[in-house]
Amino acid sequence: VGLSCFHRTVSRRDHPHHHYSYSIITMIAGTLQTDPRSGGVKRSSGVNVLPQVAETWGQVRDDNNAVDWLIAGYVAGSKTDITVLSSGSGGASACAAALPDDEPCFGGLRTSNGRFVGFYYASDNVGGMKKGRAAMHKNGVLNVLEGRDGEVDMKPGYTE
């Protein structure tokens, strides 16, 4: 980041004996980069995804298992711990029917063409603070769903 500073003293026209000074600081910003002191690791979002989420996602990814979707969300009373809220078979429409109405959630499913996609959903009944926290945690949770190749706009009534 380059900085340059200009300092100037000016006389006021209405009071020639009064002077004032001001500085103009210009900044030329570079691109935003990961802090090299962190070893190139981006800061954690502070979310703790419990092992059963990855285990259940393994079932979704297993061709020999009927489970084809999972919904994960916050452990009751926690602001950081994520667990499996529900999972099952029946594809996207069954997953959409199981979405919670009062809590933000994350999840993934196997599509009818064999793709694995993730999602984040929060209904209008979820408060702003919860939505904001969940939005910050989204990438941390979805990164646990290995092999995902996209996201879908999951909501009640969703079908492929």
Image: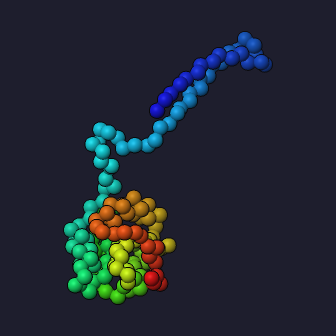
Residue 138 figure quarter: bottom left
Callout count: 0
1 on left or right of 13: left
* Residue 121 image offset from top left, x and y in percent: 43, 72
- Farthest residue toward the top? 17
47 vs 141, nearest the viewer: 141
For the question of whether residue 26 can be seen, the reply is yes
- Between residues 36 and 123, which one lies in front from this camera angle? 36
Quarter occupied by the C terminus: bottom left
Residue visible at 32% across and 39% down? Answer: 36
Q: Residue at x 34, y 55 (%)?
A: 45
Q: Who is closer to the viewer here, 23 or 61?
A: 61
In the rendered structure, the answer to whether residue 155 lies left or right of residue 54 reads right
Q: Position of residue 67 (x, y in %)?
A: 27, 83
Residue at left 56%, top 30%?
A: 26
| Residue 67 appears left or right of 132 | left
Q: Is residue 93 above or below residue 5?
A: below
Q: Position of residue 27 (x, y in %)?
A: 53, 32
Residue at 37% from the left image edge and 69% from the top image edge: 149
Q: Position of residue 131 (x, y in %)?
A: 44, 64
Whether residue 77 appears in this view of the structure is no
Look at the image and name its color scheme: rainbow
Question: Up-down: is 153 above or below 46?
Answer: below
Q: Residue furthest front?
A: 113
Above or below: residue 6 compared with residue 121: above
Q: Nearer the viewer, residue 17 or 112?
A: 112
